[in-house]
Structure formats: C-alpha cells, structure tokens
Amino acid sequence: MDDRFEEQEPDASDTLALLDPALAGSTRDFVGGAHADLRTRPRAFHDWLVLRRERGLHPYARTLQGPPGPQARLAQADGSLASGLNFSSQDYLSLSTHPAVCAAATEAVQRWGVHSAGSTVLAGNVGDGDRLEQELAEHLAMPHVRLFPTGWAAGYGLLRALVGPEDHVVMDQLAHNCLHEGARAATRHVHLHRHLDVAHARTLLQRIRARGAQHGILLVTEGCFSMDADAPDLAALQALAHEFDALLAVDVAHDLGSMGPQGQGQPGLQGVHGELDIVLGSFSKTLAANGGFVACREAALAEYLRYYAPTTTFSNTLSPVQIAVVRESLRLVRSAEGLQRRDALMQTVLALRQALHWQGLEVLGQPSPIVPVLLGPTAQARRIARALPGQGLLANLVEYPAVALNRARMRLQCMAAHTPAQALEAARRLGRAIAEAAPPEAVETAQMGLDTAEA
C-alpha cells in the first residue's frame, strides 16, 4: 500500500514533529534500503516503536478485554487499560454476541469438532461449507461461490489465480492492500486509476487495448472504501469492463450485510445486484467470523480458483465453527431482524455524522458503518489519539502510508447495538480530545528557534 499516493512534502503546519521524534516518521521509513544484516530494519523499527509507546503515541496492537460491544475495555500496547465507548470494532450488525450465532457455534463444535484439518483441494471440506457456498450464492444472486480462509486471502488469491504475467490489472488507487499485493504478485502490468474516476479508468483501458487485444484485463474496485467511506459507480464500471472485453471484480467487504436491501451492499443500493462479473468479500465485518469468498458467474472460474488460488489451495479451509457462525449470521442478515439491525445501525451512523459536523469536523464519504474524521497532519493526529482514552472513547487512528500524507484520520466504526445518544457522546468526546491535543503556543516559538538555529 506504500505506492498508492503521490509523494508530498511534509505540511508546514506539522511543526510538532520537529520537536518530538515520536511524532515524526512513518512505517514506510523502515521498508527498503540496502542492509547487509536483515535484522537492521526490524531493529530500527523497534526502536522507533518503543519511543512512540513510551510517549503514549502508538495507539495500535491493542487487545480487547471482552466482547466487542458498544462499551469495551482495551489493553494498550504499553500495558495500560482504556475503557469507554467502543467505536473501534468491526462488528457492524453486532452479531458477534448474538445468542443464535453463539448457539450455532456451540452446536458446530459438538457436531464437527473445531478444525477442518485440510485444504479445500484435498479432504478439508466440511459438509456445511458446501451449504454456506450455496446460501451465499443465493444471497449474492451469483451462481458460484468459493470460500477462502480470510477476506485478505480471497482478494490476493483471486488476483494471483486469474491474472497471468502478461495480463493487466486496472485498479482504483485506494483499493485494499490484498488487491494491490495480489496484482503486483501476478503481473508487472498494474495500472492505478484515480479514486472513483471512471473517465481515468477508461483512458487506461483504451491505452491497454490500443497495444493489443490478446491479453486479459481485470478491472478492480470496492463497494465501500474503508478509509474514505465512499463508493464507485458500479454500473458504469461494469459497462466499461464489457466495452473493453475485461472482467470487473468488486470487493464488498464493508457493505455486504450491513447496507442495502436485504444486506445486498452497494450492488443492491445501486441496482446491479447479481449483474457484476465477480464479487468478493470478507465475513469479518458483518458476519461475525474470519473468512472470505469469491463469487462468480461461471463454474469453470470457481473450480479454477480452488486449484490455482494459492491462498486456498495451500491453506486449511474454514473451521466448522466459522462456517456455522457465518451461516447463522447470514440467516439473520436476510431476516426481518437483519432489517431492524441495519436500520438501527444507520440511525447511529447519521447521528454520529451530524454530531461531528456540529463539532466543526470534516467527515468524509457517505453514510456507512465507517465514519472517517479528517484530522490532517500526522503528528497532531497522534496527539489526538493519545488523548482519546482519557476521554473514554475507543477509535482507530489511520495515518500515512495507509492514507495520503497529512491526511490522517480517526476512523470510527458503528454497530447496530450503538444508540444515537452514544453517537452524540462519542462526537463530544472526540471534540474534547482534539481540544486537549491542540498544539501549545510554545510550538510557534520553538519553530522560530529552529529556523534561527538552521540559519
């Protein structure tokens, strides 16, 4: 994901980084370079990581101390505990603790044990896995589905299996890491189009076809982008793919189940449900389990993935417990209760977005379970993240290179079990953390001193 954004100079307003090395740098600094000892980069990264932890400026690698509910406790990387309103978990319909889902998991253990004990290409298939594929195919209105051990494995595996060394991939520059990694591993012909820019995608496709018609093209996008909470024009992209004899693949990891009629995600919202070439996604956002899938229109492609997608051919298949959890979660998604939960989720989303606007904050994208709040320079965003636990709010900081430089954001993730009142309170707490982390007046003075010293 480190080559999706154009290089930018540090923002002049990010002067805090000049005063504290824990506020400077990014994970990209520890990638590449020539070192005789392969331990050099890890050691340098570890030193930087320890410094950030010591200053309370590394809000990652945290551990839940209970289920991912609207209120939660997290053990932080430095050993301290944080508790409060939980907008940091991906459990959009709050199904991870649903009694029926937990009962399905328990019954599966008693019936099948806890392990599939093999890959899908050998003897690892569990009987209910076939049923899950059929149920997903019905829900997606796609004839064929192949399961994968994780959502990341589904994206990477699809690209690695389907795209050959001389084929081309045309992809939204903000597509998920698994899609970028899969594309780069499959071919050197990877073309990134500007985010949501159908015209730019057309230009790239025209250039590729002008050079020859003998190579395959896979056009890749997402239903709901996880960092910006926006969506592409799926009908336009599908028409574009057909025009240039390409295939379109759409990753619906964040919108499937949580949005759209009957939980059909953006394809349902945009009226193209069942009409796309390939749909892939993850169970871990709404369907309460690890795992992923690829759905397609041809049995030949589905069977090809079984043998040529390395992330399923050489990995054990989903466990019986995961399969049972996803099946029961999917049943709930498609039920009247699922509709009620999606309505409750959207009420919280809309309340949170409105409350953040009232705070004068910039909220990105469209209403979805993901509510990104733009913070700007990385150093200031790290200070805000450090202040959050003290305000009783748990949320995830996203910084460069996961997003563009000086476009750091707080990504709040809503659940059906949240209430609009909790959303209003979360916005207040984020506002207080931003005020608490405001740069001291001394920063300007210190900057003047640094400028003088350099002169």
Image: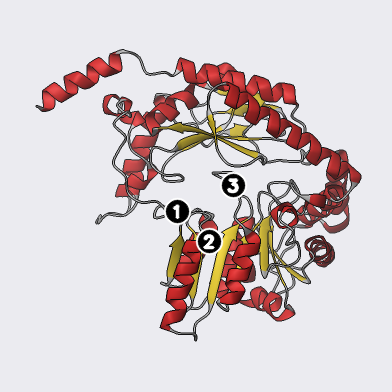
301 w.r.t. 376: above or below: below
Dot 2 or dot 1: first in sequence order is 1
Residue 167, disc: none
Q: Position of residue 265 (x, y in %)?
A: 72, 52
Residue sitting farthest toward the bottom: 214
Per the image, the residue denoted by label 1 is: 1
Colour scheme employed for the rendering of this structure: secondary structure
Q: Residues within 10 Å of mark 1 (few under 14, many from 20)?
A: some
* Kind of element beneath mark 1: loop
Residue 254 visible in rendering: yes
User: Disc 2 versus disc 1: distance between alpha carbons?
Assistant: 21 Å
Dot 1 or dot 3: first in sequence order is 1
Residue sitting farthest toward the top: 441
- The answer to which of 41 and 12 lies nearer the viewer is 12
Q: Position of residue 183 (x, y in %)?
A: 49, 67
User: Disc 1 versus disc 3: distance between alpha carbons?
Assistant: 18 Å
Q: Residues within 10 Å of mark 2 (few under 14, many from 20)?
A: some
- The answer to which of 23 and 432 lies nearer the viewer is 432
Q: Position of residue 88 (x, y in %)?
A: 62, 34
- Amino acid type shown at disc 3: Asp
* Kind of element beneath mark 3: loop
Per the image, the residue denoted by label 3 is: 230
Nearest-to-viewer mark from 1 and 3: 3
- Look at the numbered discs 1 and 3 and tell me whether their residues touch, using CB distance below 8 Å: no
Q: Is residue 77 left or right of residue 17?
A: right
